Image (cartoon, coloured by chain):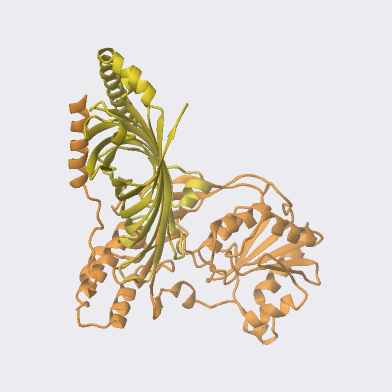
Chain colours: A orange, B yellow
Amino acid sequence: MKSVLRLLILSCSFLVFHSCVKEDFYDNTKQGNYEALWRIMNEHYCFFDYKKQELGVDWDEIHARYSYKINEKMTNAQLFEVLCNMLAELQDGHVNLSAPFDFGRNWSFFEDHPENYNDSIAKLYLGHNYQIASGLKYITFDDNIGYVRCETFEEGIGDGNVSVMLHSLASCNGLIIDVRGNGGGQLTKAHKLASHFTNERLLVGYISHKTGKGRNDFSSPKAEYLDPASDGIRWQKPVVVLTNRAVYSAANDFVKCMKLCPNVTIMGDRTGGGSGMPFNNELPNGWTVRYSAVIYYDQDMQHTEFGIEPDIQLSFSGADIAQKKDTYIEKARAFLNEKRWTK
Amino acid sequence: MKVITIMYKGLAMAMLLLLSLCTYGQEETEANSEQLTVNCQLNKEVLHSTMIGVGSSNVLDTYLSSYNYKGTDYRIQRETMRMTNLWGGRVANQSLIDLNADVNKNHARNIDEYAGGIRYTQGWFYNFMGGNVVNPVERSQSHFNFAAGLSASGYLGVVYINRSGNNPAQAKADLLINVSGMATYDMVIAKHHYLWRYQVSFPLMGIAFSPNYGQSYYEAFVEENYDHNVVFAYPGNMPSMRHKLTLDIPIKRYTLRVGYVAQFHQSMFNHLKYHSYAHDFMIGFNKYLYRR
């Protein structure tokens, strides 16, 4: 007995002393930071296959191309610029590099496209008497169409907030949910709002996460469902969701869900996308890197990384802007009113 | 299936180990029946020890960051130990509550990390020297005692990094069977007894929680898509150990305990690396009570 326990203790000691779990490597030089960034992305980023297919991005070729631009004499600002340029090749709004002096990003998903939203004009529609339920601004227009402005999903939207808002708008003939410029937030909040627009459980997509360092190490996609709100009011009348290119991340997922809900029409411009759930990591010099880590597919197992097409494409009219009118809101009102009369 | 098979094998090994310990103890009981009567009278002593400590901490959790975070570890330990009447009064029971909190920074010292948790351990030690490891100063004929045995422990903890994102924190949980060894030495200087006690323990096997490599907590707990989140732990993927060295110093009616605790907790689950190294200097008091 004594020898068995002694053997166990000795063998465990040997195993522990020879099995140190260490950080992979730490090299706080310009080259070291460059290699660390490339490696973190290489092991964790989830869209390499898709980006290669859509954009021709070859991460190995990128490593070779950018490593020539790194030298130990460059300043931190120069290093930051090179690293950001490397990351920008992925054309992913969820890929960022944060340093104390700058925030590296590629926001071409909305910066290269018409905004289709004018904040000053949109404010005229809300006026001064709108109500706010946990960040959701809402009002009833003169033609009895309800209007909800949802700028972000960072706010704590709950069933109570949504139900109070929908109860207040209950007499309206239709509802406009304006998510233009909504850059996302919490996925749970986006789903919480969408759950008030379906009476049935909907298959809205699939989730797949990385299971290892290999670029193709992914879990088998698991179905993602939207359950109808169990508490409060579920909206039964026509709904228009207004979108533009700045609808991103959780807001993109909201549009993905709403598109599957009955009585909902998506109007506006293609959304910005951003279907990867971002994770954070850091470089040896303390700069923070953010990257897409988990893939969210739509219900047909298609990517929505580069956005979702609306049911009805719209563009801002110069004439409307001159008259201080929001083309999107006007078209949505006309659509809902027409739907009311045809019904 | 493979994991379940390994778990069954591990459990069978543990049972065999316990069985062999029991058998050995029974033989000893027969051989030392007179000693048992004496021990049963003496084994009513219970040691309570409370210590607080501070030291260094080094935490790596690649789910959160690729790099080590280093800082300060704060620790509280509450230990209760008593001899039992099992196997001829040679078995000591130890229960240990170990609470720790770390405040760490990354290499660049621009991001903070807070880690901590609580481990509860219940162990049984067979004393090979026949003495009393609870209070060897009074009971042992020998200055040296050696005990070894098994313990079961459970841990709940968290590692949090103060930056936004979908992976700011990591939950830690495990249920383990450990193998432990303990040695005591009664050092007498000028008729005063100073008791040295050294204890080492290693996790032998158990189960632990871990997210998968790139799995978000949202997916695991909101969407309920579990993916190898309960893993079988064994020294191959959890090569860990804990050391504790204490010195009991009698001061009039009290016993001061000073010590050093070293913890090397490591794991490699789902390709995620984790380690939590801590070295603490501890100080506290012992209290001996007698059960009726």
**In this view, A282 is above or below B54:** below
Residue at figure coordinates x 34%, y 75% from the top left? A84
Residue B5 is situated, as x and y percent measured from the top left of the image, at 31, 27
Q: Is residue B4 left or right of residue A150?
A: left
Q: Is residue B172 visible?
A: no
Q: Nearer the viewer, residue A336 or A106?
A: A106
Q: Residue furthest top?
A: B30
Q: Is residue A271 left or right of residue A56?
A: right
Q: Is residue B51 visible?
A: yes
Residue B189 is situated, as x and y percent measured from the top left of the image, at 22, 45
Residue at figure coordinates x 59%, y 55% from the top left? A191
Residue A120 is situated, as x and y percent measured from the top left of the image, at 65, 82
**In this view, B18 is above or below A6:** above
Residue B179 is situated, as x and y percent measured from the top left of the image, at 28, 34
**In this view, B85 is above or below A135:** above
Rendered image quadrant of residue A333: bottom right
Q: Residue furthest front?
A: B190
Residue at figure coordinates x 61%, y 64% from the top left? A155
Residue at figure coordinates x 64%, y 52% from the top left? A195
**In this view, B160 is above or below B90:** below
User: The N terminus of chain B appears in which quarter of the rendering?
Assistant: top left
